[in-house]
Amino acid sequence: MMNLPKNIQQPLSLIYLDANATTQVLPQAASAALSTMETLFGNPSSSHISGLQAKQIVDKTRQQAKRIVGAAEGKIIFTSGATEGIQTAILSALVNVKKTLNKSLNNKSYSLLYGATEHKAVPESLKHWNKILEINAEIKAIPVDEKGQLDMAFIAKEVPNALMVCTMAVNNETGVYQDISLLDQTIRTNNPNVAWMVDCVQALGKTDLVLAQTSIDYAPFSGHKLYAPKGIGFMYVKEKAPFTAFIAGGGQESGLRSGTENLPGLAALSEIFSMLLGESEASFTPIKTLHLYRQQLVSALTQAFPEITFNHSFENSVATTLNFAIPGFSSKEIMDLFDAANIRVSSGSACSSKVTRSFVLDAMGLPAWQSESAIRMSFGPAMTQTEIDIACSRIVSAAQALVQSCLTLDKKNIDTQTMNTSSTTNKTELDGLVQFKAGGSCSWLYVDKKTRSAVFIDPLSEVSERLQTLLTCRGLNLVAVIDTHGHADHKSCRNGIAKKFLAEQQTEYLGWPAGAQTTTIHGQTFQYLILGDKWLIKVATPGHTDDSMSLLLCDPVTDSAEKLQVHYAFCGDLILMDSIGRSNFSTSSAPAMYSSLKLMKSLIGNNSLICPSHDYHNEFTTCLETEMKRNSLLRQVINSEIDIEEFTSKKIKMDKDIINESGSEIMCGALIGACQKVVVREYDSASLTKAVKKSSDMKLIDIREPHEYALQHDEKFTSNVPLTRLVQFVKEQQQNKEQEFVLVCRSGGRSQLAAQALARLGFENVGHLKGGYALHQY
Ligand code: PLP
């Protein structure tokens, strides 16, 4: 019986490089917080001894904060965090200007200025209070240059009409810092009295601050970005700056911020302040050393990914932040890779991690790919040399894992004559079908391991680099690169690949090689290519377009009267998941499509896997058996329940309702409603452990990509079926549909999709680990 271990991955110590999102609470801060919960738990407003002891903690922390930020006469007010500080500052400034504005005026001639790379808390709060207080000023973003530096000329021009200016000391995505004294000068020369807030969240502990030497009115800070717990922050308010309490109540904080103080948070913050002030036995790493750490990370990254691009200049950014992009890889892919190496990084800003681009890098005018692939590595002043060393060696191992799975080339070992890598040792061999996806479209690679022959079908330009790298890295012999039809909605990279790898080849159309052999099946003649022990048969299947063809990967034809043994049917947009390709292009023909569907049915089996050129809902593959159950129009054609005329009229009606869901992508299939939801068994850690103990037969499948699996797994317990090879897995397990499979991945997203796809295809016993390894308790 297989026992599920506590950790179904090999444990690796965590390397946390996402300090700009939040930090761990340092042990001394945690223990100070604990002691205020267990012993010094008084209410600072109480006049008994416990209260006095608590008040002393509040007072001490305030005095420390004043010294750290150079507040002099200014006030320090404790808050729940920076977002509250930002509200308080904006509310204070706007309530004050409201008094002087004529209520009946449309105030569009006034503006509220904020830096274009500001944390979302700033523009969103400006919008909010501008509306609530009916200020009706125009909210304007101050542009930044390619280095992330604020445009001083813009400020000089706009600030005379500004009711408030909001800037940041250090950017959270890039670490870029602003020249505060230049800003000060620019703002005050042009508007001596305008309220000015500087978000100092990412500056604390990373730059020197002497706020009293500036004319800054408000400066919010946050504890959790510097090793204190979440829920504690503070703000600096310049002496005599307008102030309106954001929270009223019991009059704590001299009436400026009511609510019983967060004593545990304050005690922890005080410990951090002691470290910053050099008053603690523990100390932070000096900034000079932090620069060396960043340099070491940069060297490791550059060694690991020679084509890396850094998204900011190191000259004007704090030592603790690195933002970069690796050509050919999305942020998500790199995050998955680093997560597998147990290194935590983030893509763009953690607060908006669902967004795939970085508005900060966009504002800096960086190319789209850099913004889409941005990765942020950030650390704090408690970082140690040991952690940096481990991080660097893991970064190099992670890059090697990409080389091993042929997603990048080992440039040192490449033979520039043949373009082959000299060593294919250790590389996981490729055999069979691989699916590549970009948006809702698919490309397919079929490889015969023995002969190393390969064919690309429907190669998308988005995956061009990846396909070429694979080909070179594995030393494959490309037999053909073929499109199933002239795609209207996306770009094919067929010509580019053919030019580079098949320069001598003569082709008929869409990449089908000229002079291919022919065979006869049921009296009809078809051309075919040989791929190891399989044939790739070309079948004209017009309808979606007049040039549409299907490519059937099957066993060689030995008897022309026998039924073909088709493993995969690459049918372009003829049959799609839960739909049939659209037939309202100028070269479309619904009657031809009817005949093509009939022909396909006569050639492929009910369980032959259909590999279309689109997969809008992550179903990966399908087969006639599955489609016949849910696609009534297809079923009617196949079962001859309708004739060509009826099909044509139904199809015309259907094509009218094609939904262009994504806005930009032409939906190539007439989608009938949304993706069919399939419910699969969900396990959590405990129920999976129990289920594994009960069932000796259960198979745990790790659905991550090979490079992620290589970095961290325990093959005693899981085998690897990457999502890109799921279709091949379906093929291999078609006779084994009652087998119990439980799929696992990093966060449960991919495993759920794959489990649903298997269930849809008739696998009876599939489940997945909800929340993935991330929530698996070990
Ligand atoms: N400002 C900046 C620059 C930040 O990085 C963050 C947090 O990500 C905030 C404001 C919000 O801080 P808090 O989480 O304390 O509300």
Image (tube, rainbow, N blue to C red):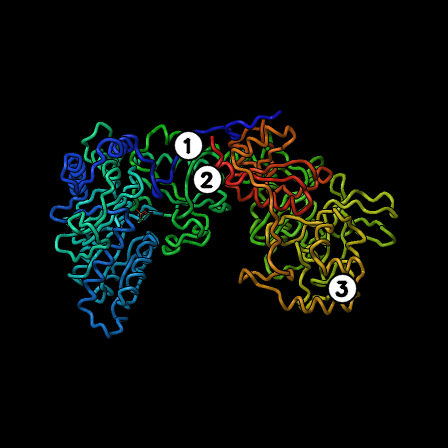
Q: Secondary structure at mark 1?
A: loop
Q: Residues within 10 Å of mark 2 (few under 14, many from 20)?
A: some
Q: Position of residue 737 (x, y in %)?
A: 70, 39
Task: Indicate left or right for 109 with 486 as reference.
Answer: left
Alpha-carbon distance for marks 1 and 3?
A: 59 Å
Choose between 446 and 109: the one closer to the eye. 109
Q: Going from the N terminus, do you reach mark 2 or mark 1 first?
A: 1
Disc 3: which residue: 592
Q: Position of residue 662 (x, y in %)?
A: 54, 60
Tag 2: amino acid: Pro
Tag 1: amino acid: Leu
Q: Going from the N terminus, do you reach mark 2 or mark 3 first?
A: 2
Q: Residues within 10 Å of mark 3 (few under 14, many from 20)?
A: some
In the rendered image, the residue lying farthest to the bottom is 104
Disc 1: which residue: 14
Q: Secondary structure at mark 3?
A: helix
Residue visible at 17% across and 50% down?
A: 251
